[in-house]
Amino acid sequence: MPFTVAIDGPAASGKGTIGRAVAARFGFAHLDTGLLYRAVGMRALDDGQGVVDPDWSAELARRLTPADLERDDLRSARAGQAASKVAALPAVREALLGFQRRFARGEPGAVLDGRDIGTVICPEAEAKLFVTASPEARAARRQRELGAASLEEVLADLRARDARDAGRSVAPLRAAPDALLLDTTDLSIDAAVAEAVAYVENRIRRGRA
Ligand code: CDP
């Protein structure tokens, strides 16, 4: 039986770093599901000359190819905002569901990080983590990653995206009731990864018992 690790949380909470480290530690595949929405969002912006068309976005999601995930502008703040717009469209989420579920059941296991992995994509995941941090800590991290000039702008961007992600009617950002909550505000990367690894190890051992 494959083992699935679901990691959810708001922007720049550390879920990607933790996801990659957990996957490497256990030899599992890793999928950053945010990239799927970022890729659809950027193509929708390109095709709509800056305006996201809902029907066309769903068509783009259905046609998404691995090459679309290779664009080098997917990590930008613009891509993040475009992603959270297309991510609020039920038809876009529906189009990306099957791929994510198949990925989650790959042998010997898979780690997926996003917003709705433990609640919608893999409610049966063997291990679930919900990673948070204060908005200020998250903005400071994202500012360093992007080399962005203004902390205020980054903070405003994160708050807008958090509000859209948590407020949408389809698959809103929230912790699954059975997820381990990990607040990384005052944790180093190593300490956060160590907690996540210990939790997953525990869940694997329990599954074998
Ligand atoms: O890296 P960061 O946390 O800033 O964002 P991301 O994980 O790449 O996600 C970008 C956007 O995609 C989010 O703001 C969500 O609107 C959307 N998303 C989603 O709705 N569901 C997911 N499973 C992953 C991302």
Image (cartoon, rainbow, N blue to C red):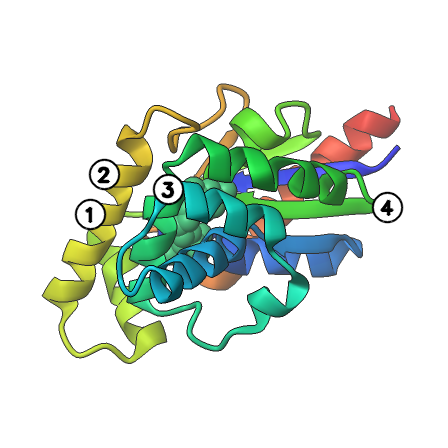
Q: Quadrant of residue 142?
A: bottom left
Q: Amino acid under label 4?
A: Pro
The mark closer to the camera, 3 or 4, is: 3
Q: Are marks 1 and 2 in contact (CB under 8 Å)?
A: yes
Could you tell whether 2 is left or right of 124 in the image? right
Q: Amino acid under label 1?
A: Ala
The mark closer to the camera, 2 or 3, is: 3
Numbered mark located on residue 163 in the image: 2
Mark 2, ligand 1, within 8 Å: the answer is no
Query: Is residue 201 visible in this depiction of the protein?
Result: no
Structural distance between the alpha carbons of marks 2 and 3:
20 Å
- Answer above or below: position of 65 versus 178: below
Residue pushed farthest top?
177
Numbered mark located on residue 160 in the image: 1
The mark closer to the camera, 1 or 3, is: 3
Q: Amino acid under label 2?
A: Ala
Structural distance between the alpha carbons of marks 3 and 4:
36 Å
> Which residue in the protein does label 4 denote?
108
Helix, strand or loop at label 1? It is helix
Binning the other alpha carbons within 10 Å of mark 3 as few (below 14), some (14 to 19) or many (20 upward) gives: some
Query: Is residue 79 visible in this depiction of the protein?
Result: yes
Q: Of 131 and 123, which appears nearest the observer?
A: 123
- Give the quarter of the figure containing the N terminus: top right
Helix, strand or loop at label 2? It is helix
Mark with earlier residue (1, 3) = 3
